[in-house]
Amino acid sequence: MGLGLIGSIIVGGFAGWIASMVMKARTGLLSNILLGIIGAMVLNTVLRWIGIYAAEAWIPQLFVGAAGASALIWVWRKING
C-alpha cells in the first residue's frame, strides 16, 4: 500500500534533512522533501533491479530515502563541480 502522500512528505523531509546533514549541503525544507522523495524513488528502483525490496514502512523508507538523497547530492556536486 505504501506510505501515502502525507507519509511520503514527512519521511521525504526527514530523509532529505538527514542527507543534507551527512553531505553538508545547505538545502531548505522544500529541497529536503524533494530530495528525500526522489532519492527514495530512485534508490528503490535500483534496489528492485537487483532483487532487493525495501519494506513499504516508515523506517526502511527513511533509510532508503536518506541514502538516495545523499546519492543525488553527490551526483549533483559531480556534475556541477
Image (cartoon, rainbow, N blue to C red):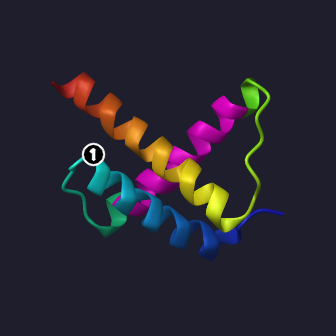
Q: Which residue is mark 1?
A: 23
Per the image, is 39 magenta? Answer: yes
Residue 67: give x, y in percent of width and height: 48, 44
Residue 27: give x, y in percent of width and height: 24, 58
Q: Quadrant of the C terminus?
A: top left
Q: Main secondary structure of the magenta part?
A: helix
Vertical relation: 9 (above or below) 68: below
Mark 1 neighbour density, 10 Å: few (under 14) some (14–19) many (20 or more): some
- Give the amino acid type for the residue marked by disc 1 in the picture: Met
Q: Within the image, what quadrant is residue 76 found in?
A: top left
Q: Residues in magenta?
A: 32-47
- Numbered disc 1: secondary structure: loop
Per the image, is 41 magenta? Answer: yes
Query: Residue at 41% across / 36% down in the picture?
Result: 71
Residue 23: give x, y in percent of width and height: 27, 45
Q: Is residue 30 left or right of residue 55?
A: left
Q: Quadrant of the N terminus?
A: bottom right
